[in-house]
Image (spheres, rainbow, N blue to C red):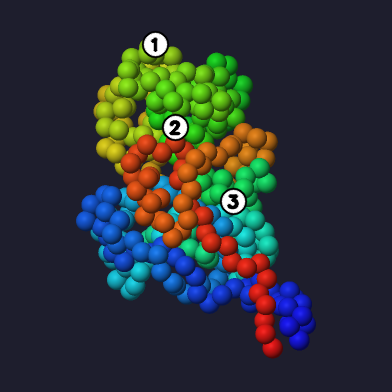
Amino acid sequence: MLLIASIASLLLPCSALAPKTMRAAVATGAGKSEGDFSKIKVMDRQVPQPGNGQVLIRVAASSVNPVDWKIMSSSVLNVLTLLGPKVMGFDVAGTIEAVGSGCSRLKIGDEVWADLGKSSILHPIQLGAWANYAVADESQVGLKSAEHNFTEAASLPLVALTDYQAFKKAGAPWTGRNNLTVVITSGSGGTGLPAIQLAKHFGAARIITASSPSNFQLLKSLGATDVFDYHKTTIWKELEDDSVDFVYDNYGAAGTADLAMPSLRPGGVFEFLPGKGGNVSKNPKTGVTQINYGLCDSSKHEDLDALKAIADVGHLKAVVKQSFALEDILGALNTSFTGHAVGKIGITMAQQADVATVLV
């Protein structure tokens, strides 16, 4: 009877084999300040069920972004947790466990990735990646590249989508333009590493960035042509006037726009990611376009599909030098908060049994 039951269980849809509860890293409220993770707990939660147009992802891995720990000290989180603990996390990679009604593009067993940062009026912050299972709209989930394992894939969605969309706003791809020069202000962080690779993929001939000397070799292997030691100098001191076509200020510090203006050519673009006091210059050079990137749009799988195509040809590699188990989420957060991580901090989930044995 046990053998028959085990065979029968293989014939059940994967969703029927999913447990009713899961482990999840949740916020019970907002911390008092950035770096206060005392309100983050790993606990048992109900496995969510996909609704119309949604899929259930069996999560294999996630990662930590600076925005994760920024949200944890936001007053918005106090509102979101009024009805109970909120499962945290943006980046997700895993396998489709179940599909809701109205889904037609993805199927059970597909290996996928997504940024659970989609927002709406009713759900201002989606989240939910730091758990064994996560629900997402089918429209925001893409098939992951076979070039990435789950941990690598889970390190990329938010940062790579941000870079991809920022570059598109700045006019990429730059086909047919000779000697195009791009500056990426911070090279070794979460958005820096994909940005270097995308700049090269989109046709930049010269890619300039800054980092600690220990990361020079890595950044050059990904496509950077000039890497300056930010301990000793600044990018702007090293550049000639009118020598740069696009400045991508992925660090977003106050005053960077003004410092960058002399190096930008007329017709160039300055774009910054908000969050650290950055802004556009009040006295821009004539002919320079300035862009406030705003927020990442994670609602369209088409952008993830474009990134998958870039990864499939070897032009988008992931850098994950440290990973933590979900149960050690505080270790992952504290390591990220130091600001010294190269690439991304990974989070791996305890794997459920592939096949459930049913006793009858």
Marked residue nearer the N-terminal end (3 or 1):
3
User: Percent position (x, y) of residue 170?
Assistant: 47, 32
User: As drawn, is 23 to the left or to the right of 311?
Assistant: left
Q: Residue furthest top?
A: 240
**Residue, far front:** 2
Task: Give SS at disc 1.
Answer: loop
- The spot of residue 42 in percent (x, y) is 40, 65
| Residue 142 seen in render | no
For label 3, the residue is 150
Which amino acid, mark 1? Glu
Q: Report which residue position mark 2 lands on.
A: 188
Q: Residue at x 44, y 30 (%)?
A: 187
Q: Is residue 160 left or right of residue 275?
A: right
Q: Amino acid at mark 3?
A: Phe
Residue 240 has which mark? Answer: 1
Q: Residue furthest left?
A: 32
Residue 269, above or below 19: above
Q: Element type at marker 3?
A: helix
- Judged from the image, the secondary structure of the residue bearing numbered disc 2 is loop
Residue 233 occupies quadrant: top left
**Residue 106, which numbered label?**
none
Q: Are marks 3 and 1 in contact (CB under 8 Å)?
A: no
